[in-house]
Image: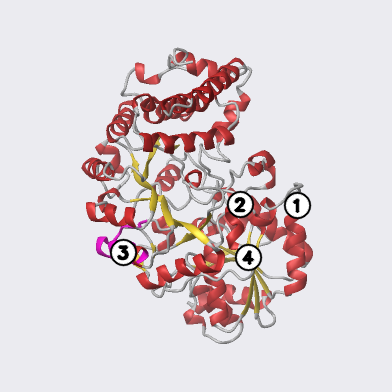
Amino acid sequence: MDHNLSPIFNKIKEVFPRDCRRILLINPPVIPEEEFDWEVARQKRYPVFPPYGLGIIYRKLKENGYLADIVDLNYGVLNQKEFRYSVWKDQLKQKILQFKPDLCAITCLYSMSHQSMKDVADFIKEYNRKLPVIAGGVHPSAAPECVLNDCESIDFVSLYEGDSSFITLIDFINGKTLKNKFSQIATKYKNTYIIIDNRKMEDDIASAPEFGDLPIGNYHHLGKIGAYHYLLSDEVKASTVLSNRGCRGNCTFCSVKAFYGGNGVRQRDITTVVDEMESLYKKYNIRHFMWLDDDLLFNEKRAINLFKEITRRQLNITWDASNGVVASGITPEIALGAYESGCIGLTIGIESGNPEILHSIRKPSGIKHFKRAAEILQEYPDIFTKGFLMAGFLNETLGQILDTIHLARELSLDWYPIQILTPFPATGVRKVLEEEGIVEANDITSRFFVGSTGGQRLREKQEKTEAKEFYNPFEGSLNKIPTREELKDIWFIMDYKVNYEKILLEGRPVKLRMLQKMLKDVCNRVHENPLANLYLGIVEKKLGNYNESQRLKHFAETYLEGSTFWRKRFEALDLYRLV
């Protein structure tokens, strides 16, 4: 090991000629400058999660005798009245001057934040070329060589979870540990890529994060925390919490297994989890929590006891599972515990309604589990239910996509977020696409089609005056495998069929009020959307708000007149009858 990897230790000695005692933890802007839209930021559509992983590292550094500080540049960019994107440079420079770090550590969760991470690293080196820079998080862990090749200002990549391995690195720099303790690090030395990728599994995950002087109680004012923010009043402060790490599944489109390793799900002690929630409740007045877990319901008994402990302490909080839960984990006892402990939103990972596709993507649940989960949740109408759907799987036919539409309509959950398959690095589907030459191995800019940075909204703008032809592909041969371009129209049809069309039959006041809040949020975020305004008008009419209903239908008519993109879709789906 020493012989083959000696260059990595030589690199460490060169980059760190002295001790490393002061570590600055940096959360970069989520959205790169060239893609940032101030109007989207003003409408609070961008994600603004507290940097949970950095909070864990911050605590671990302090516990091991090091000095640490956190700067959240994403928060800084969004927290402005008079907008200037480059404000993050002033904030970072000021923090470096004040704290005088021996190392800057940048986290990066999303592939879409790659350029932001790179810009932050470059700025640090421009300010002080001798100041070491390390990057970590899900994105750098998924494609470390690509990150190092593209970001010359990054000296090292810390792989996977860093609770222990990052501390080991700092200890080694300071002469407190030996080489054989080393793990989870990559670098380039004299144009050669070197990696130590043996994992140091994190068995002790009891620690809650510490955030220094970050204003955790103010994050919810600046953007989205979770997928159910519209159900909360403006006065309710929201944050995040994590009860376990990993997932029982090994879905081919997901990178969770690659990041957390294949040792199943590691669970925190229930008491420490609820202690963390209670601490945030008392310190920052947090009243709503989004679970960061990828498999919240992994252990039925534990999940029930977790919900009971929240209820027992009478915290009077609410929570949601925006990241999605495994359908087979939903039981009557789980649903009851979730409801009593404050659940207002629950998302199920469905993805497909076709058994062959579900098998090929290795979903841990099947059709019978989805139906059973939906049936159980019908007993709790106060919980807003969602189901993740996806289209564009490898060799997926139109008929198989139609199976997904039919299942979603049968399940009758409240809403279905839909995405076109995105081949993120370190996923099974990405590996197949690279082997077939469909995706370049060094392409690390993958992003979702739908969302605040997705292509759907951009397409609406581009085709406002002159739209491409739109037709219903399901009227042809269902054995056809649609192209990537055709999937964009398929997404639209799926969205209408599984989300909007069923509103015409909805009559339950509790569900109508939830849909009212959600559609208001859509209309406020996505201006000139005749479909959302039309159906919000229908909901308002069902709730007895006739004047508001007419006003919204007038908006729908006006937006239709100004957009060829929308007129073609209303014609193809026979929606003018509703206007």
The residue that mark 3 highlights is 308
Near-viewer residue (352 or 357) = 352
The answer to whether residue 103 is magenta is: no
Kindly identify which numbered label has been placed on residue 86. 1
Q: CA distance from mark 2 to mark 4?
A: 14 Å
Image x and y of residue 464, in percent: 61, 21
Query: Toward which corner of the image does residue 212 lie, by quadrant?
Result: bottom right
Where does label 4 land, which residue? Answer: 214
Q: CA distance from mark 2 to mark 1?
A: 21 Å
User: Measuring 27% from the left and 41% from the top, which residue is drawn there?
Assistant: 378
Q: Report whether 386 appears left or right of 354.
A: right
Which stretch did the figure color magenta?
295-310
Please report contact status of discs 3 and 2: CB closer than 8 Å, yes or no.
Answer: no
Res. 379 mark: none
Secondary structure type for disc 4: loop
Q: Earlier in the sequence, mark 2 or mark 1?
A: 1
Magenta run includes residue 302: yes
Q: CA distance from mark 3 to mark 1?
A: 46 Å
Residues at marks 3 and 2, CA–CA distance in whole angstroms: 30 Å
Residue under label 2: 221
